[in-house]
Each structure stands twice: as structure tokens, then as C-alpha cells.
Image: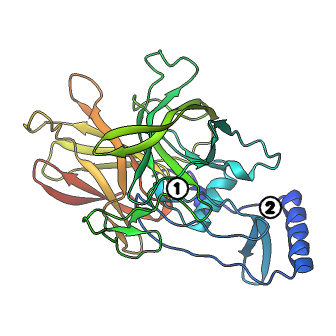
Amino acid sequence: MSNKKNIFSEEIELSEIVLKKTNQAFEMIRQEDTGYMKKTNTGGKKLFKMQAAVIAGICILAVGSISAVAAIRHYWGRGMNGNIQASDAQQQVLGERNVAKVYREDPDGSSPAVTDRGVTIKPDTVVVDDRFVYMSFCISGYSVADGMEPGFEMVNVYRGDAPEDDGAWVNMSGTMYNGIMSDENGTPVYEDGTPIENSEDGSIVCHYTDQNGNMEYIIQASVVDENDSFLGGTVHVDFKNLGTFSKATFTSVVEGNWKFEINLSDVSSATNIKVGKKVEGTGFTMENVDISPISMKVSYSVSAVLAGDQDDLCIPEVTGVVLKDGTRIPYLTDGGGSGYTDSSRSDAYQIAGYDRVIDVDEIAALIVFISSENKKTEIPIMK
């Protein structure tokens, strides 16, 4: 087991600048007789939670049992917290460690925004580790009628500055955030945890806009080569033509182009854990797992590959985790891929993103799906 500290175990040291801004904020609250801060928390899976309201961009962070200090809160946008859900504390830690960046918090107001044909798009939140990057973009100046599905005609995501290079493209999925998320068991719910409603025609009622009339586009991208890394790199995101979808047919409403260059953090949040346990009923041994709060890479040695159908590589798939307190999250992983490292099929891998942030130190076991036997098993990874 690695002796590397997980980032959620570390203390957050507050700078004098933070404390100064905190004091200024409290003075503003006192002078304006602002009485309280209201916060709404919900839980769920890949499709989201309402961001908390905050007064003057600060909150109270308890330290020990008898003292308290204030810190700038790194509140993720509505869409990002549906793309990969996180508690307030997790958002704070990832922000302090430069794993996550909330653009609207930039003190110099330099958040990049592009306006074309009256529609403004700007990055909201970016979360990155070695293998995955999660991005959300705020869209203002455009709205759709109830029952309509907004979207772009084209969204291109590529690495570096040369989109034609073989190593430039990434595995990517993206969509307009629709206000729906899933709970720990994979059941779809709304942001406040209430059951999903159906419209009169039986379709799911979606909520694309926030209270300010803005929408968010969410992206999850992963590396193509399992040995590659996003850290310290640059990702380009190009949006083209905004409109609506109906039965997979796109209708353009605003013909425009919005292009962004996102510089990614070089901070690794991953911990490598030696496992060395055979996956029962297969010829695979889980050798190690490189795991971060937002994704994992599982490495296997292979003694024999069972015969499968043409689309089944027979590689065991980690789908969830069991925490030390007994909590099971069976549907954690979301996106990624698996394969063999070479034609000999002596080694295999799986890379997977999550639908929620996980404290690596709290993971006791991995839940593994074995396709050849259509069953799940658990592999302990922590003592």
C-alpha cells in the first residue's frame, strides 16, 4: 500500500490574504445587516446538485473543537456538481489543492468569456487528474421553451495546439445539464432528491435553466492512451451553432462559434495501491490500482483469457466501491475504457471516471463485475 497521503487527509492552511478578505466580508455583512446564509444540500449520481448560496464568497470552516476561521469557498457550478458530485468539504479541498478551478472566483476577474450573436459562454468549473478532466460552461443569452432540448451542433475537444495530430483527440462525452442526477444506487432523481416527474406524453421533465435563466454544458473527457496524462497540458473546447434537438435532429437557432483554451493544473491527486489479488473465476489478477478522488486506473496481469463474444474483452470491470464504514456505492464509475497493453494479452487495464468525488482513504474494497459469469465480487484494497 502506498504511504502517500490522500489530499482529503491534509489540513488546509489559510493565508493572510484569505483572512483579510474574510474580515472585510464580515464587516460588509455587519454594515448591511445581512442576517444569515441559506444553503441547500442534496445527494445523488451523474446528473447533479444545486450549488449553495453564499454571502460575500466566504463561509466558516471549523478548526478543532474550540476555534473557527473563515475561508473562501470553492463552490462548483450547478452543472459540475451534477457531472461529478461532491460535498462542500470535498469541493473546498480540491479547490485548495488546485485539482479543481472555479473560474468565477478569479480575483482579477479574468475568467475567459466569448460572446457571439448575443450568446455568451464562459468556463465555470474544471476538475482534472492524470486521466480525466471534467468541465462545465455557463451559457447566457439563450433559452428554450419547456419540452425542448437545447444543444450544440458540434462540440470539439482536443489537446495541445494541433488538432490534426494523432495524440490531440480525447475520449469525450458532453451534454446540456438537465437538472437530473442519480443517487448512490443509480436511481434518477432531481437535484433536491425528489423523484423524477413525467410530462403528459410520458417524457421526463428536464430543468435546463437555473434561477438566473442560464444553462450549463458539461463535458467529461479522458485520455486515449492509458499511459498518457492531462496534467499540466492544454485542452481546447470549440462550440459551434446553438439550437435544439428533436428525435436526434438538430435545428440551428444561433449560428456562432465559441472557442476556449483551458490550461490544466499539473497537480496529481492519485495514490498507487498495490493489490496483488486474483479476481475469482477469471484468469486476471488485480496487480495495482492508481486511484484519485475522481478516477482510477486498474492494472491486471493475465494468465488466461476466457472466450467471449466479439464485443467482450472479458476484462473485469470495477463498477463501484465499498467504504470502510460499510457504505456501498455500486454505481460509481462512469466513462473510460479497458483493453490489453499488447497483442500477447498478458496485461490488461481499465480506466474509469466517477460520477461523484471519493475520499481514497475511506475505500475498503472495489466492486468488480465479471462479464463471463455475469456476477459481481469484491476485491479488498485497504487494510
Q: Position of residue 159 (x, y in %)?
A: 53, 26
Q: Residue at x 36, y 50 (%)?
A: 334
Q: Secondary structure at mark 2?
A: loop
Residue at point 53%, 62% (across, down) = 86
Where is residue 292 shown, x and y percent of the image?
Answer: 49, 50
Residue 290 appears anywhere in the view: no
Q: In the picture, residue 63 is in which quadrant?
A: bottom right
Residue 31 x, y percent position in the rendering:
92, 78
Query: From the viewer's perspective, is 311 left or right of 138?
Result: left
Q: Label 1 sits on what residue type?
A: Gly
Q: How far apart are the two marked residues, 1 and 2, measured between alpha carbons?
A: 28 Å
Residue at 78% across, 77% down: 68
Q: Residue at x 13, y 36 (%)?
A: 305
Residue 341 in which image quadrant: top left
Q: Which residue is mark 2?
A: 14
Considering only vertical position in the picture, is 196 above or below 122?
below
The amino acid at mark 2 is Leu
- Choose between 97 and 383: the one closer to the eye: 97
Q: Which mark is residue 62?
A: none
Q: Is residue 149 in view?
A: yes
- Between 130 and 114, the one nearer to me in the picture: 114
Q: Residues within 10 Å of mark 1 (few under 14, many from 20)?
A: many
Count how many numbered circles sit on residues in the image: 2
Q: Secondary structure at mark 1?
A: loop
Q: Please determine whether, in this image, residue 324 is positioned above or below residue 369.
A: below
Q: Is residue 301 above or below residue 57?
A: above
Q: Position of residue 11 (x, y in %)?
A: 69, 63
The residue mark sitting in front, 1 or 2, is 1
In the image: residue 242, left or right of residue 123? left
**Sequence-wise first label, 1 or 2:** 2
Say which residue label 1 marks: 79
